[in-house]
Image: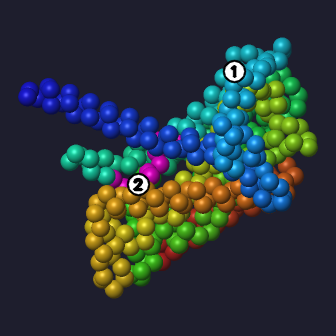
Amino acid sequence: MTPFLYAHQDLLLFAGVGLAKVIVFMGGVMTFAALLTLAERKVSALMQDRVGPNRASVFGFAFNGLFHPIADALKMIFKEDFVPAKAEKFLFTLAPFFAIAPVIALFAFIPFGDYVTVLGYRVDLQIADLPSALFFILALSGLAIYGTFLAGWSAKNNFALLGAMRGAAQMISYEVALGLTLVGLLMIYGTAGLQEMVRAQGALLLGFIPAWGVVLQPFACVLFLIAAIAENKRTPFDLVEGESEIIGYFMEYSSMRFAGFMFAEFLEMIVIAMLLTTLFFGGWQVPYLYEAGFTLPGGRAIPLDHYIVSALQVGSFTVKVVFFSWFMLIVRWTLPRFRFDQLMALCWKGLLPLALLNILATGAALLFLGKL
C-alpha cells in the first residue's frame, strides 16, 4: 500500500473516531438534559409534597412521568411561533442560537475518561484536547451574553429589555469572579489543559489523600460553585427572569425559540456539573485506580482489565456529574431569590475580594513550600 493510501486511511480513521466520540458523548449529554427537565419538576414536587408530572403515557404506560420530556418537545414543536410585530426579526431569531451554541461547544473540551484502546489504536476520551482548554471555556461561555441581551433588545418590549440588561450585568460581573476562582488551580497544577489537570489529580498527598482540586483549593471550590450558579441565572440568582417581577428577557418567545433558551439553561447546568467534577473532584479519577488496576495504600494491588478500568473511570465521571446536577436542582427549590442589589454586592463585595484573597494565599503557600 502506498504512503498516500496509508495517510488517507489514517485520516478516515481519525475522522471516524472523532465523529463517534461526538455522537456518543453529545447523545448522552442531550438525553441527560432532557431527563433533567423532568427531574426539575420531580424534585420540586417532592420538596413541596406533590406528585409531580406523571400523566404522559404511551399505550397506557406512564412510567411515573418518564415520557414527559417527549410530550414537552412535541408541545413546543406544534405551538405557535409568535414574533412581535415591532421586533427586529433577524436578531430575534438569532438570539436563541447565540444562547445555546456556545454552551454546546463547551462540551468538546471536557474529558469524560482517560483513554481506551480500539483495534490497537489509543482513543482519548475527549473530543478536543487543547493545552489552553480552560481559557477557551471562559471565552466561549462569555458569548452566551449575546443571546440573553439580543433576546430582550430585539423583542422591543420594555420588560424584556429590563431582563436583558439585568442578565448582561449579572453575567459579565460573575464571569470575572468565576475566572479568578480558577487561578489557584492553574498555579497548583501548572496547566490549563483539562485532561492534564485531571491526570495530575490522580497523585496522592501523604501517600493516601487524592490530590483533587477540592482538597488543594476547597475555598475556590465553594466560590466557583456560587459564581457558576449565578452565571447560569438560576435561583437564587434568577433576577433576569423573576416570575413575580418582569418575566424575563425571553418573555416574547414561544415554540422552539423558547425551547432553545430553556434547553440552554439545562445544558449549562450539565456544563457546571462537569467543570466542577473535572476541576475539583478528580474528573474521571477513581481513588487508587490506575491503568493496571487498583493500587491501595500499603502496596496491595488488584489488577484489572483495561476495559474494566476505562468503564470504571467513565462511570465515576458520570456519577459525579449526576450528583452535582441533582445538587443544583435542590438549591433551585431551597433558597429564596436575592434582590438585584444583593446579587451585585455579593459578586463585587464578596466573591471578587475572596477570590483575590485565595490567589494571594495560594501564592504564599506555594512560595513557602518552594514550589515557585
Mark 2 residue type:
Gly
The circle drawn on residue 85 is none
In this rendering, is residue 100 above or below 324?
above
In this rendering, is residue 129 above or below 314?
above
Which residue is located at x 44 percent, y 51 percent?
111
The circle drawn on residue 113 is 2
Which residue is located at x 76 percent, y 17 percent?
88
Mark 1 residue type:
Thr
Q: Nearer the viewer, mark 1 or mark 2?
A: 2
Q: Determine whether the residue tagged by mark 2 lies in a helix, strand or loop.
A: loop
Please provide percent x and percent y for residue 363: 52, 68
Most foreground residue, 153 or 79: 79
Q: Is residue 275 visible?
A: no
Magenta segment: does it hold 89?
no
Please provide percent x and percent y for residue 240: 80, 41
Total marks drawn? 2
Q: CA distance from mark 1 to mark 2?
A: 37 Å
Query: Quarter holding the N terminus?
Result: top left
User: Which residue is the site of mark 1?
Assistant: 93
Which residue is located at x 67 percent, y 60 percent?
327
Which residue is located at x 22 percent, y 45 percent?
119
Magenta segment: does it hold 110?
yes
Write down the region rendered in magenta. Answer: 106-115
First reached walking from the N terminus: tag 1 or tag 2: 1
Please provide percent x and percent y for residue 358: 61, 67
Left or right, 199 with respect to 334, comes to left
Most foreground residue, 167 or 62: 62
Extreme-right residue of the structure: 244
